[in-house]
Amino acid sequence: MDLSRLSRTDLKKLTGSPSQIAGIRESVLSDGKGRGTRIAEIYTGGGLSFTVVPERGMDIQHANYKGIALSFITPTDYSHPSFYDPSPMGWLRNWGGGLVTGCGMIGAGAPDPVEKLSLHGLLSNTPAENIVCRREWVDGKYILSISGETRESRMFGENLLLKRTIATSMGSNTFEITDLVRNEGFTPSPLMLLYHINIGFPMLSENSIVKAKKHDVVPRDETAAKGIKEWHKFDAPVKNYKEQCFYHDIPADKDGFARCTLSNTRLGLDFEVAYRKKELPFFTEWKMTGEGAYVVGFEPANCHVEGQTAEKNKFKSLKILQPDETGEFKVRISVLEK
């Protein structure tokens, strides 16, 4: 049954509350390192559900489609940002994985010893505020959305405000992330924004393959160069596997969105990431098929993953946001049955 075609009147006749079919459940975790962490579980009634974590910069943690897990979860799982370790690689100690991790905003990717920036920046360890959940009929569709604001600021430094909205609708198998980043300071500021989309088992398996329009693929380093011929294929978990990263230049479709898909033939599912390429011109594939670390990352971004200094000097593509300037970014994630 296509629930997206139900009218408001139909739904009123068939249910006592729309939450019977689709909705948002807000709660606060009460145990372990996740204690005090706000979460919002969004379920569409069409099989797609995912959990937004306002405490972690509006990241998305667990996600599934008709009971099939989509995201990779680390041994850390839910962890409050108060456990953040600011050492160069300390980000990994407080990273629970999840379907979408925000990286940025003045630094993303590798630690930068020159600018004294740690791995992947502060965004995922900064609580959002002004959280608003909406459940409303708009143009005949029952829309579910959550929005919040995350600020990265310091005295005598940057003052960037991210306004994020994550939206879907009843019966849908797609959700969209819309980000507005505004420089509320008085001086130009670097802006590095990366969407770390982490796909795990069983969506990822030896039956999975990466698909996209014909495009150029460049290995990040010598380790990745050794696996360049199989950037799109996956084995079962490999002992002592070393991560490989590949830079993709995927052409945009007529709607301005570039698309990359992880297709699992055994499950009969496609996991598609679409991103508006004008603002997110770069895409990194993080291939990490190790034991207990079995994940592929699809990472649309306005930067590479080698840190701010490399973005400025090596790639010469560091985005600078002027005072009062706002950048808009869009990412869509869909699960499609074949």
Image (spheres, rainbow, N blue to C red):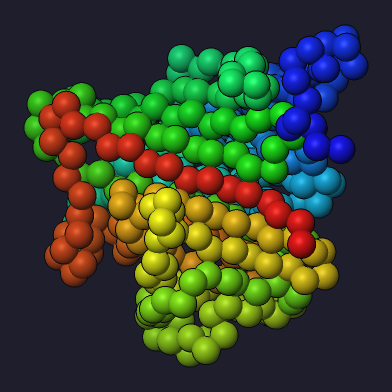
Quadrant of the image for the C terminus?
A: bottom right
Quadrant of the image for the N terminus?
A: top right
Q: Quadrant of residue 122?
A: top left
Residue at screen point 43% across, 42% down: 330
Of all residues, the one furthest to the left in this rendering is 187
Asked if 80 appears above or below 118 in the picture, the reply is above
Nearest the viewer among 4 and 226 is 4
Residue 209 in the image: state x and y as whole percent. 65, 74
Q: Is residue 207 left or right of residue 152?
A: right
Residue at screen point 81% across, 52% down: 68
Asked if 119 appears above or below 190 in the picture, the reply is below
Nearest the viewer among 28 and 134 is 134
Q: Is residue 288 left or right of residue 111?
A: right
Nearest the viewer among 90 and 199 is 199
Nearest the viewer among 147 and 98 is 147
Q: Can residue 88 be seen from the camera position used here?
A: no
Residue 176 in the image: state x and y as whole percent. 53, 39
Q: Can residue 195 be seen from the camera position used here?
A: yes
Numbered-mark total = 0
Residue 33 in the image: state x and y as whole percent. 65, 34
Residue at screen point 35% across, 47% down: 193
Residue 61 in the image: state x and y as whole percent. 64, 41
Residue at screen point 46% across, 14% down: 130
